[in-house]
Structures are given as C-alpha cells and as structure tokens.
Amino acid sequence: MATFSIVFQNDEIIIVNKPNGVSVQGGVGISHPLDKELALQLGQPVHLVHRLDKETSGLLVVAKNAASAAKWTGLIASGQVKKEYSAICIGLPVSGKKSFGAGQKGALRDLVFAHGREQPAELFFTVESTASLPEVAMSFLKIRLGTGRMHQIRIQLAKASCPIAADDQHGNFKLNKILRRYGIKRLCLAATKITLPLDGGTQEFSVPLPEHMQRALEACGLSE
C-alpha cells in the first residue's frame, strides 16, 4: 500500500502531495489509484473534487464526505481556490510575436479542444529562469490558470513553442529524446502552491518541487 504525504486536513478536506506516476482515480488497467490507496491509509472513504494528470505531481484536494465534495467542487469551479503550477519547459513561451525571457510575465489565451468541443483557455505565467543546454534552450515557469482545466497547461505551452520537458503526449518528442541524455525522463510539471478559503480567510499551502524536477533544474542549469 502506498503512503501519501498529507499537507493539511480538517473535518472536510485533505490536501495530499501526489507523486508523479500515480493515477488519481481507478479504472480499467489502473492499479493502486490515489483515491483507493488514500482511503486505505486513512481508514475512511475519500471523494475527489478535482484531478491531476497521472504524470503531474503536487497538491491535490480530496473531500472526506459527499457533502464536502459538493461544496469544494463548487469552490474550485467558482475560482475561489487558487492553484499555482511549476514547469520546466523546452524553449521560451511565445505569445503573438513576443518571446518572453527571464523575469518577464505574460499570458496565453487560446481555444483548446477538450471534452468533445473547443473551450476557452487562459493561463498566466512568469519566467523564473532560463538556461541553455548545448542542443536546446530551457526555461522554468510558474503558472496559474485563468480559465480552463489543468491538462490544458500542457496543450497551451506546446502551442506557444514552449512544451513541458518530457511531455510525451503534447510535447516535442525529438527534443525529449535529447533531454533523456541529461536524465530528464519524467514530466516536469507540478502543482506546487494552493490557496484556499478557510476559517473566514484564506490559507496558502506549498510543497517543494518533486525530486525529479529538482534534478532536472540542476541538469539544465536553471534556478527556482
């Protein structure tokens, strides 16, 4: 049985630090999903209120009962829960004709095909640092979503000439092969900060980058 790191819990929710490579929910061909493993760890059922891709690490909110799940699903849908992601990317983000360098902030606005239809997707980013390997330029971004879903981060960054390192679904497959020579083999995307409405105010929780991303930063010469 997997043991998950619990960042916070109260009577309604639990915030878990999900590792890379763990599916959030079970299904055909999926073994040891987070929802079932966490229920075993806690000795009680848990209810998902949002999701992270299997390959994405970081902070995930789950509810302790159905009523809390409905409440927190609504809070997330209404934008009252703020999430920040960290990503190591190939290249620099491009919006329109502008390329963004270290210390610069920008936004990407697209129509992304998801759930059978085109949907508006908006994300805001800060380029924290840049570096160059012999074959490719790299960047480290902090990202938050305006509209759209978490999975659209991967799609939008790929469209902006800045695919996430080791993204073998939406990324640059040729350059990903080069990155493997530097030990960068797992998706470099993590949900590292979350701000929640709690106890009449807001509380912020954060986690360090997962180890595989810390090693990737070092291999690329990037800084947080």
Image (cartoon, rainbow, N blue to C red):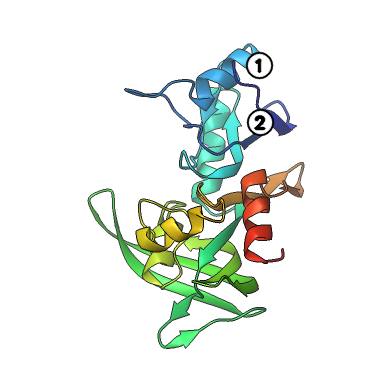
Q: Residue at x 66, y 31 (%)?
A: 14
Q: Quadrant of the C terminus?
A: bottom right
Query: How many dots with numbers?
Result: 2
Q: Nearer the viewer, residue 50 or 80?
A: 50
Q: Nearer the viewer, residue 56 or 25?
A: 56
* Numbered circle sitting on residue 42: 1
Q: Residue at x 48, y 42 (%)?
A: 55
Q: Residue at x 56, y 56 (%)?
A: 182
Secondary structure category for the residue under label 1: helix
Q: Is residue 165 visible?
A: no
Q: Is residue 99 left or right of residue 83?
A: left
Q: Amino acid at mark 1?
A: Leu
Q: Nearer the viewer, residue 132 or 199?
A: 132
User: Label 2, on which residue?
Assistant: 14
Secondary structure category for the residue under label 2: strand
Q: Position of residue 180 (x, y in %)?
A: 49, 53
Q: Position of residue 71 (x, y in %)?
A: 55, 36
Residue most extreme to the left: 116
Q: Quadrant of the N terminus?
A: top right
Q: Earlier in the sequence, mark 2 or mark 1?
A: 2
Q: Position of residue 18 (x, y in %)?
A: 60, 36
Q: Position of residue 195 (x, y in %)?
A: 68, 51
How would you rate the neighbour count of disc 2 (Cα within 10 Å): few for under 14, some for 14-19, many for 20 or more? some
Q: Is residue 26 left or right of residue 187?
A: left
How would you rate the neighbour count of disc 1 (Cα within 10 Å): few for under 14, some for 14-19, many for 20 or more? few
Identify the image quadrant of residue 129. Answer: bottom right
Q: Amino acid at mark 2?
A: Ile
Question: Looking at the picture, does residue 55 appear above or below residue 125?
Answer: above
Q: Is residue 123 visible?
A: yes
Q: Do labels 2 and 1 touch, CB within 8 Å?
A: yes
